[in-house]
Image (cartoon, grey):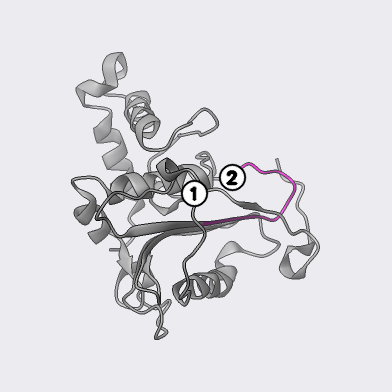
Amino acid sequence: KWSNNFMAEQVFRDLGTTSAAGDARGTWDGGRKVLQDFLKKAAPPVQKSNILNGSGLYTGNRYSARQISSVLRYMHHHTWGPEYKSTLAISGVDGTLGRRLRGESTKGKIRAKTGTLNQVSALAGYMITASGREVAFVILFNDPPVRAWRLRPEQDAIATAIARENRRLHQPRDRSQRGIADGERLHHVIALQHVFHADEELRGVDLGAVIMQQALHDHRNGRCARQHDQP
């Protein structure tokens, strides 16, 4: 359950050796092609996304919260969905969440992937809320005025607030966007994208750590008061 950048890069490279890579087979470009083709099915549209590496270790990858939420919904209904979820860290139990989210309302009830760079912190996955519903969620922080890892307590507080929700949460009007299949338990998708500057572009985040779009801009309150003029 530990995040392993080296292994992520090897999986990315291995994708490029498959026949789906076409003329780019055996190259990094081949890996990118295979992944882009997958995202066209799982998380359209992908025009504004960018893939440069498999680990998200530097700021080349760009995905919106909406695209990542689509991936979570897609994998929830996928044949290999249970195996996919089993690779995610369990809150308060193991992996990168072993020492996080250990409260009564969250321990053992969240399976998620973390993603951290100096200016990025991400937490995304699935949880069982107090109402008994399974929820897919994403929390992305970009360009905070402090090192992003220092905002993990705030990130956990948001996740805890979602976990304690005991009411029917907001549903998109269009049923096709809800990620619901008859008999399935994934009832809601919650997404939070918090950008600490005016630029809505997302800096690099781990591919496994992302989810739906409600861009939240609050530049004048609390920790968000300071803006950065970064490219």
**Residue 171: numbered disc:** none
Q: From the viewer's perspective, is 62 left or right of 197?
A: left
Q: Which residue is mark 2?
A: 202
Quadrant assignment, res 94? bottom left
Residue 114 can be seen, yes or no: no
* Residue 209: in magenta span: no
Find residue 203 and report its horizontal and vertical position in percent.
58, 45
Residue 73 position (above or below residue 30): below
Decide which of 5, 101 is in the foreground and name it: 101
Find residue 110 and report its horizontal and vertical position in percent.
36, 69
Decide which of 215, 183 is in the foreground and name it: 183
Find residue 107 and report its horizontal and vertical position in percent.
36, 79
Say whether marks 1 and 2 touch (CB < 8 Å): yes
| Residue at image point 35% right, 78% down | 92
Residue 20 position (above or below residue 207): above
- Callout 1 secondary element: loop
Specify the farthest residue to the bottom: 104
| Residue at image point 54% right, 69% down | 155
Q: From the viewer's perspective, is 206 left or right of 186?
A: right
For badge 2, the amino acid type reads: Leu
Crowding around mark 1 (Cα neighbors within 10 Å: few <14, some 14 to 19, many 20+) is many
Crowding around mark 2 (Cα neighbors within 10 Å: few <14, some 14 to 19, many 20+) is many
Position of the N terminus by quadrant:
bottom left
**Residue 205: numbered disc:** 1
Residue 183 position (above or below residue 68): below
Position of the C terminus by quadrant:
top right
